[in-house]
């Protein structure tokens, strides 16, 4: 699941980003309001963590503009100001929840899960290809009702493949989405992780992950006929 964090305090932003990534979320970080607004309007996120006091555009303005644009992504607002007026303003503008600073990460994570459930986002968080199921709320993978243990990067790779089932994903796309860096043609890190993932999700069962010679990978059900350049 993808979370947008709009927070200008670098220590706080780093703390939230690191914690969410450890929970296996994909995190985009913006340190000013203009960047945060553009990311929110031009990308699909499962939730937004939005600080009220960010430069260039404050959190209330960002929230107002994304709601006016018809964007109903769940929003958890953060603020160092805990006055009732601020909370009422944020909720009236369309915030789903409010968390005053300082806070414990466990509470932030729990509130995020809660607003995503309330918004109905949880209805679409179980991804499935054949008998392979990935729960993007609990971050658990299952096949034939048996749990598959995945590392953080293996989970991120599998989620990206499953969210784009039947679609060919280039190595460059995978590297940028999962590793957040540009693709190095000399590196075989993607192939190494795909091999590990195949060993776990295809063990003793149908094949799902196919390599496209010279291009990248895609995930699909075995019942579909392989293309000429698929392996």
Image (cartoon, rainbow, N blue to C red):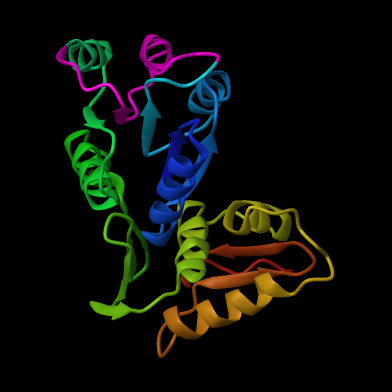
Q: Is residue 177 above or below residue 94?
A: below
Picture coordinates of residue 125 (x, y %)?
30, 50
Picture residue at 33% right of the left edge, 62% below the top: 139
- Residue 116 seen from this side: yes
| Residue nearest the viewer, comparing 203 with 177 | 177
- What residue occupies the far right of the structure in this picture? 186
Q: Is residue 222 above or below residue 2?
A: below
| Residue nearest the viewer, comparing 12 with 21 | 12
Picture residue at 46% right of the left edge, 68% below the top: 152
Q: Is residue 183 left or right of residue 143?
A: right
Picture residue at 21% right of the left edge, 41% below the top: 111
Q: The C terminus appears in which quarter of the rendering?
A: bottom right
Q: Is residue 96 left or right of residue 39?
A: left
Task: Give the mark count.
Answer: 0
Residue 66 belongs to the span the image colors magenta: yes
Magenta part of the chain: 56-84
Picture residue at 37% right of the left edge, 39% below the top: 46
| Residue nearest the viewer, comparing 76 with 146 | 76
Q: Is residue 51 above or below residue 136?
A: above
Picture coordinates of residue 65 (x, y %)?
42, 11
Q: Which quarter of the figure has residue 123?
A: top left
Picture coordinates of residue 171 (x, y %)?
71, 60
Residue 213 belongs to the span the image colors magenta: no
| Residue nearest the viewer, comparing 110 with 2 | 110
Picture coordinates of residue 115 (x, y %)?
22, 36
Q: Which quarter of the figure has residue 78?
A: top left
Q: Is residue 102 above or below residue 206?
A: above
- Residue 231 seen from this side: no
């Amino acid at each position: 699941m993808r979370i947008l964090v709009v927070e200008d305090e670098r220590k706080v932003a780093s703390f939230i980003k690191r914690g969410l990534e450890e929970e296996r979320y994909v995190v985009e970080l913006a340190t000013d309001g203009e960047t945060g607004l553009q990311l929110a309007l031009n990308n699909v996120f499962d939730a937004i963590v939005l600080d009220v006091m960010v430069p260039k555009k404050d959190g209330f303005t960002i929230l107002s503009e994304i709601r006016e644009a018809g964007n109903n992504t769940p929003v958890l607002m953060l603020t160092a100001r805990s006055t009732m007026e601020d909370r009422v303003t944020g909720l009236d503008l369309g915030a789903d929840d409010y968390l005053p600073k300082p806070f414990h990460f466990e509470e932030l994570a729990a509130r995020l899960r809660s607003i995503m459930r309330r918004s109905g986002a949880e209805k679409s968080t179980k991804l499935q290809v054949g008998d392979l199921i990935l729960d993007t709320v609990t971050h658990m993978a299952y096949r034939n009702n048996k749990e598959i243990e995945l590392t953080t990067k293996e989970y991120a790779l599998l989620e990206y493949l499953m969210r784009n089932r039947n679609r060919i994903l280039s190595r460059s796309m995978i590297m940028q989405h999962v590793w957040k860096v540009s693709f190095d043609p000399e590196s075989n890190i993607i192939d190494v992780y795909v091999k590990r993932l195949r060993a776990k999700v295809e063990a003793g069962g149908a094949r799902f992950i196919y390599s496209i010679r010279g291009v990248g990978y895609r995930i699909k059900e075995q019942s579909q006929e392989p293309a000429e350049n698929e392996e």
